[in-house]
Image (cartoon, coloured by chain):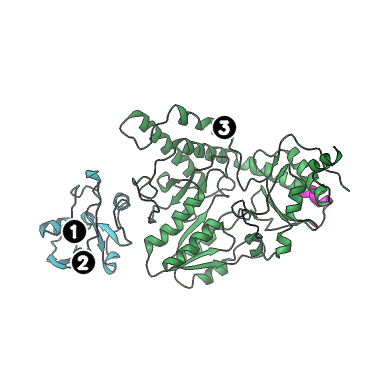
């Protein structure tokens, strides 16, 4: 099974199983990694914002317009930011590394 | 001595690169949005808010149509100075990667030069490129500057003092090839020349309302969506305008900007022909009496309404004092608070003495043939040394 790494806000590295076909958001939830995902992957919020390791960023499928629109609203956006719910694990992503941003904005609570 | 023409009933305004008269049709379109439909376009829970929101979105599409963009790519601002600041500082601060070089041109508007210069304090490397004597940027000079990996290139489409038109499509292509973002200040170009921001692969562009017969205090910033260009906003706030520009949108001003864009698009070709005719008429008449008058900046690639003229034998300050009924300028209004010679003219290679004998003349939509005839006669008389008509009358009294 592929593996992936979350780098938590305090710098802790969490190496976890990453089952094929699951999203980074779903994997985070399986392992109790602190990513919110308020809209449960329906592209209505930016609370599952993750910062992808630059070496891995190029290997991801291009974001859709809808994902870009949500990323526009994310806090602490970087050049390698993506939404965790839109990254689906494939064999090619075995070893993926993502970092949690410093904060998120939940539009659903505003 | 050439005698001055009779004084006009009101000042003759030939400073249309500083600002333009708000078109009465624009004012008419704006008025109901001040007094009748005054809802906040962000108040989406009631009809007053949603009608304001709808008119703002229609305006976005209208402005986009004028510049060759998609409505979603436009963010409303207070004008081109704010748009230029958001574009340049926002792009630099968002990227903040290993690319530190920011390239612009010596003849840019002050707000571009100052925005780029200010970024030096944040560890960026500002580069100010020279222009050729005709005011145009040599593409090879840009290519050479981009040999160092560059974050952003900013080149204005039309210069505000000499009216020359840069080849934005070609310059943007050079920047893109080098992996840099490309920003252009189109404050003096929008509505005057055809623009195709999408086709030209421009990433960021700044638009102003009051240069195109719209109201002062409103403008727009074009931010490319595909591929997405990201900026760090300057304002903290409610996250309006996709988070790029917090603050309540001024719906009446935005309606004015929209109507100004609609009129400019509809009348651009006809207006260009008319203004070219007026400009040539003025230049021909001045040359007939002052053969050694010189035009600064390329005449071949220039907006129709601009002349920048060096007079052989009188300073601009003296000429303006002798013709108080004629509104022209010595340089850009934004720099005229200082008595320094125009840095744009210096960049063309003019000496300080030559720059001091230079006037900027901006012909616009509301300029009449009679205005041109007055300006030609008054400037000719002033150049020959005739005192201001008001002073003369006072002396006789």
Rounded to the nearest angstrom, the CA distance separating label 3 from label 1 is: 55 Å
Q: Which chain has been coloured cyan in this picture? A: A
* Residue pictured at 76% horizontal, 36% vertical: B8
| Residue carrying label 3 | B25
* Mark 2 Cα shell of 10 Å, populated few (<14), some (14-19), many (≥20): many
Residue A96 has which mark?
2
* Residue pictured at 80% horizontal, 44% vertical: B377
Tell me, yes or no, whether the two marked residues, 1 and 2, touch with CB atoms within 8 Å: yes
Tell me which segment is drawn in magenta: B283-292
Q: Is residue A90 above or below residue B12?
A: below
Image quadrant in which you'd find residue B46: top left
* Mark 3 Cα shell of 10 Å, populated few (<14), some (14-19), many (≥20): some
Q: Residue furthest top?
A: B36
x and y, in percent, of residue B347 in the image: 64, 64
Q: Is residue B90 above or below residue B64?
A: below
Quadrant containing the C terminus of chain B in the rendered view: top right
x and y, in percent, of residue B353 in the image: 73, 63
Q: Which chain has been coloured green in this picture? A: B
Is B136 in front, or is B207? B207
| Residue carrying label 1 | A24
Of helix, strand and loop, which one carries label 3? helix
Of helix, strand and loop, which one carries label 2? strand
* Residue pictured at 36% horizontal, 50% vertical: B236
Task: Indicate which label's residue lies in the foreground, 3 or 2.
Answer: 3
Of helix, strand and loop, which one carries label 1? helix
């Amino acid at each position: 099974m592929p593996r992936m790494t979350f780098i938590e806000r305090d710098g802790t590295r969490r190496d976890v199983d990453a089952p094929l076909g699951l999203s980074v958001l779903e994997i985070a939830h399986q392992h109790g990694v602190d990513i919110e995902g308020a809209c449960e992957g329906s592209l209505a919020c930016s609370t599952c914002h993750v910062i992808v390791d630059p070496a891995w960023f190029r290997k991801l499928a291009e974001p859709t317009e809808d994902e870009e629109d949500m990323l526009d609203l994310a806090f602490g956006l970087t050049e390698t930011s993506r939404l965790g719910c839109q990254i689906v694990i494939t064999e090619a992503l075995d070893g993926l590394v993502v970092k949690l941003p410093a904060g998120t904005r939940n539009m659903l609570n505003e | 001595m050439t005698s001055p023409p009779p004084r006009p009933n009101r000042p003759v305004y030939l400073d249309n690169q500083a600002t333009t008269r708000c078109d009465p049709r624009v004012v008419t379109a704006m008025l109901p949005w001040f007094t009748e439909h005054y809802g906040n376009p962000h108040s989406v829970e009631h009809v007053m808010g949603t009608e304001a929101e709808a008119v703002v979105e229609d305006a976005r599409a209208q402005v986009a149509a004028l510049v060759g963009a998609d409505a979603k790519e436009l963010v409303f601002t207070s004008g081109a100075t704010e748009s230029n600041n958001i574009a340049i500082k926002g792009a630099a601060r968002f990227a903040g990667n290993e690319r530190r070089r920011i390239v612009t041109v010596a003849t840019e508007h002050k707000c571009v030069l100052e925005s780029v210069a200010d970024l030096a304090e944040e560890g960026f490397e500002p580069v100010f490129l020279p222009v050729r004597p005709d005011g145009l940027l040599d593409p090879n000079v840009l290519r050479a500057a981009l040999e160092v990996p560059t974050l952003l290139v900013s080149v204005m489409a039309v210069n505000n003092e000499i009216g020359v038109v840069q080849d934005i499509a070609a310059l943007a292509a050079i920047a893109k090839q080098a992996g840099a973002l490309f920003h252009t200040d189109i404050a003096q170009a929008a509505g005057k020349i055809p623009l195709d921001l999408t086709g030209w692969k421009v990433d960021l562009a700044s638009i102003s309302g009051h240069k195109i017969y719209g109201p002062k205090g409103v403008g727009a910033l074009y931010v490319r969506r595909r591929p997405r260009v990201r900026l760090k906003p300057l304002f903290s706030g409610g996250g309006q305008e996709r988070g790029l520009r917090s603050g309540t949108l001024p719906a009446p001003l935005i309606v004015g900007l929209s109507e100004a864009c609609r009129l400019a698009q509809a009348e651009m070709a006809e207006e260009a022909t008319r203004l070219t005719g007026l400009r040539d008429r003025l230049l021909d008449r001045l040359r007939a009496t002052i053969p050694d008058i010189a035009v600064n900046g390329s005449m071949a690639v220039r907006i129709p309404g601009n002349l920048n003229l060096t007079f052989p034998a009188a300073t601009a300050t003296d000429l303006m004092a002798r013709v108080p009924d004629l509104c022209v300028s010595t340089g850009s209004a934004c720099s005229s608070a200082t008595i320094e010679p125009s840095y744009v003219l210096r960049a063309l290679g003019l000496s300080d003495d030559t720059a001091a004998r230079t006037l900027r003349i901006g012909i616009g939509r509301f300029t009449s043939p009679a205005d041109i005839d007055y300006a030609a006669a008054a400037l000719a008389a002033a150049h020959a040394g005739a005192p201001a008509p008001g002073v003369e009358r006072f002396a006789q009294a």
